[in-house]
Amino acid sequence: MDQLFFHPRVVHLPLALSMLMPLIGGGIVFAYFRGWFDRRVWVIVCLLQALLVGSGLVAMKTGEADQEQVAQAVAERHIESHEEAAEVFLWASALVLALMVLPLGLSEGDIRNALLIFACVGSAAGALLGYRTGDAGGRLVYEHGAASVHVNAAASSSDNRVQALEEYEEDADSHE
């Protein structure tokens, strides 16, 4: 049963990080400009952005694995809309990561400071793209019935949906 719900479990990390990165990056840049942090603290921002990109790749792969199954219940154009939004989001996040890594190799100066600011602006754009991706995924589930594929698969493996839900809850409880 666990494999049926893997994509919805992993998509939340890159989406949440995309919303937090402008705040984290902007806060650290502000603190750096005020002299509160050493420039090495920027490594934390780079690592979080790398986690966003890595978890985004995992989310994309699990989404591709679910695509055939979901296509049974949802029109292909809706799936493609979500898929395209996810691809743009992932590429933009990787570009922002590259922007974030560049200042680490530069000495103090205007170019380094400009790159830090551009990286923060890029992370804000990434948040908007993450929102767009999540919105398209939410529409698949809540408007177009993508979750019904998983519910029907769980119900067909049991006598009824209530029993399937009970089995899922028991399985979840056993992993805690």
Image (tube, rainbow, N blue to C red):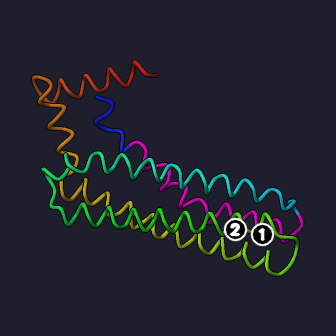
Residue 6 in which image quadrant: top left
Q: Position of residue 11 (x, y in %)?
A: 42, 49
Where is residue 101? Give x, y as percent.
Answer: 70, 63
The amino acid type found where label 2 is placed reads Gly
Q: Secondary structure at mark 1?
A: helix
Q: Is residue 164 above or below residue 32?
A: above
Give the structural element (helix, strand or loop) at label 2. helix
Residue corresponding to mark 2? 26
In the image, residue 122 above or below residue 74: below
Q: Disc 2 vs disc 1: Cβ atoms closer than 8 Å?
A: yes
Q: Is residue 37 left or right of residue 69?
A: right
Amino acid type of disc 1?
Phe
Q: Quadrant of the N terminus?
A: top left
The magenta segment = 9-35
Q: Residue 174, labelled with which disc?
A: none
Question: What secondary structure characterizes most of the magenta part?
Answer: helix
Q: Residues within 10 Å of mark 2 (few under 14, many from 20)?
A: many
The outermost residue toward the front is 105
For mark 1, what is the residue?
30
- Residue in view at x 83 percent, y 66 percent: 32
Local packing at callout 1 (Cα closer than 10 Å; few below 14, some 14-19, many 20+) is some
Determine the residue positioned at 39% across, 67% down: 132
